Image (spheres, helix red, strand yellow):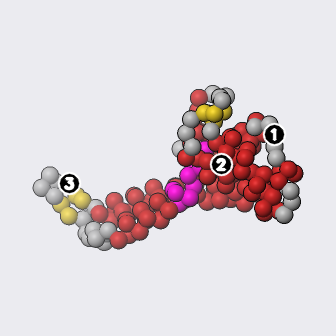
Amino acid sequence: MNAEFRAENKWVAAWLLEKNERKAGIAARREEILRSPTVGIPKIPSRSGKVSDPTGFAAAKLAELQVEERWIALIEEVEKRLPDKQRIFLELRREAGHLQGDIRGRPSWVPYVQCKYPLVMAERTGKKVAEFYISHPNTYTAWWNRIIEYTARVAAKRGLFG
């Protein structure tokens, strides 16, 4: 895989992990832009001869938010398309997103998800925990990579990569 694909996958992974925080941030920034006291003020020449355009500035900021909102919509659509077990996996992967470091050569999210996944699945389905235990941690990294790749393909089709 070339460097461009790796960079895109890293970008997608960040959006997948931080969707909720980014969505809240977008809403807060939108509110801040719309409440700005300078929106709607006419263009005013300054001493430098340049014209300030508060409304144009606000429109540009809102346009930037629209791109981010398209990413949020994409991530939410991908989540809906995932099978239940992978959707639950993604929830747990997000929970483990704050964990740092490696545990015996593995990213620290892997053992976290490996321990928690069977418990959550058993709770949600009413089945036994043992039915959902996955002994090989590479299964989780494969799921994660598959979700990233799928999301990146959809994003590329929608022109979200610059």
Q: Residue 56, position in %: x, y?
A: 34, 62
In the displayed structure, 37 sits above or below 10; it is below
Q: Residue 6, position in %: x, y?
A: 61, 33
Quadrant of the frame with the N terminus: top right
Q: Residue 63, position in %: x, y?
A: 45, 59
| Disc 3 target residue | 50
Q: Which residue does the image show at 69% across and 41% down from the upper left?
A: 111
Q: Is residue 58 left or right of residue 153?
A: left
The magenta segment is 12-23
| Disc 1 target residue | 135
User: On residue 93, which mark appears?
Assistant: 2
Report the amino acid beneath label 3. Lys
Q: How many marks?
A: 3
Q: Nearer the viewer, residue 101 or 24?
A: 101
Q: Nearer the viewer, residue 43 or 30?
A: 30
Q: Which residue does the image show at 24% across and 59% down from the upper left?
A: 52
Residue 16: tell me if it is visible. Answer: no
Q: Nearer the viewer, residue 122 or 71?
A: 122
**What's the magenta bit mostly, secondary-structure-wise?**
helix
Within the magenta stretch, is there residue 13? Answer: yes
Within 10 Å of disc 3 (Cα), the crowding (few <14, some 14-19, many 20+) is few
